[in-house]
Amino acid sequence: MSITVRNLVKRYGQLEVVHSISLDVADGEFVSLLGPSGCGKTTTLRCIAGLEDASGGSISIDGKIVSEPEKNVLVPTYSRDIGMVFQSYAVWPHMTVAKNVAFPLSVRGVSSDEIRRQVDEALGIVGLTELKDRYPSQLSGGQQQRVALARAVIGKPKVLLFDEPLSNLDAKLREGTRVEIRRIQRRLNVAALYVTHDQEEALTMSDRVIVMKSGHVMQAGKPRELYHEPVNRFVGDFVGTASFLPVEATGDPGVWRTADGTSVCVRRAAMLGNSKACQLMLRPESVSILDDDAQAAGSNSLKGRVLEASYMGPYTEYLVEVSGGTLKVHSQFDFAVDAPVQVHFNPDSGRIVPGE
């Protein structure tokens, strides 16, 4: 593994913000740390980079231990062979593009000829060769971020670390830049760890996603797995859009009862353990909405009323009040606010998760 973290702990005084977490990132793998602000994802990344001193556990990069407080091992950041892209562009305004990119090699004492060769190669990778003599003030936000990316990949580091690098870009630019980051990472075939609170970024860019909450790992897996098979409500709610209805077991396998006594068939369930408060999770695209008097055979049906309607372009998002809660539903059909409706979903579309 290019990155191996075992039982990482980080404390600030008596406050523990990262609670004995472990993770691996293999060569060529792109892994995202996903979670809300304050969940410990950036602190974890900074411990791996050496920008924060871990309080416990061990961190290895390319098979070499770079942090193990119990054994007084602490390798400085500049010796960890990493490339890092920060949330801010962190480019020096008084330096040209080429000099910004060359800086990591300059401080290592690399020869001028070798610096020029590697700068040209790095700028070629990010598509900025023709802009190498410009200053940051002459670049767009997206171009400045690509300068930061070129500076991170120069020298071919063992590991790439990203700390919410797209948060300062507009929506269209973010979409194009995340494709560019993924292309470059695949070309270099290095391990990449990417911190974000944006679930769309995590799902579209990652081979695996690690969902964090309050300094703990909630679930790790492939994007499709996290989306369709969350282990609890927090993961289901944070990875994508979902609605939740309280249900209780009936004693019949796969049959559950809603708050108004309606029986529904749901074939998929998380590990519920001793949890008595179970909830039915439904994604808005997996639920259909019909007129109150329509017939829909072979699916679960709940009576409801339209509370809100938001036109989104490809579909309208409806908020439908049903017994026990509300459901978000995506549909291309038009329904009036306050209209009585019914919602339907297939037994394989929902998932039972433990409540909170």
Image: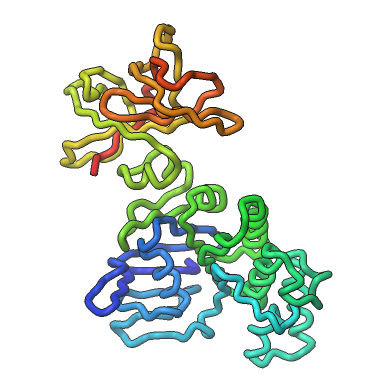
Res 182 visible:
no
Q: Position of residue 88 (x, y in %)?
A: 57, 70
Q: Looking at the rendering, which quadrant does residue 29 occupy?
A: bottom right
Closest to the observer: 277 or 209?
277
Query: What is the basis of the colouring in this image?
Result: rainbow
Check the picture and name the quadrant holding the C terminus: top left
Q: Residue furthest right?
A: 130
Q: Position of residue 143 (x, y in %)?
A: 71, 65
Q: Looking at the rendering, which quadrant does residue 151 occupy?
A: bottom right
Residue occupying image coordinates x 45% and y 53%: 209
Q: Position of residue 99 (x, y in %)?
A: 73, 82
Q: Count every numbered label the image shows and give the total.
A: 0
Q: Does 280 sit above or below residue 20?
A: above
Residue occupying image coordinates x 47% and y 19%: 336
Q: Does 349 sit above or below residue 228?
A: above
Res 335 visible:
yes
Residue occupying image coordinates x 25% and y 22%: 255
Residue occupying image coordinates x 29% and y 77%: 12
Q: Looking at the rendering, which quadrant does residue 229 occupy?
A: top left
Closest to the observer: 352 or 70?
352
Q: Position of residue 130 (x, y in %)?
A: 83, 69
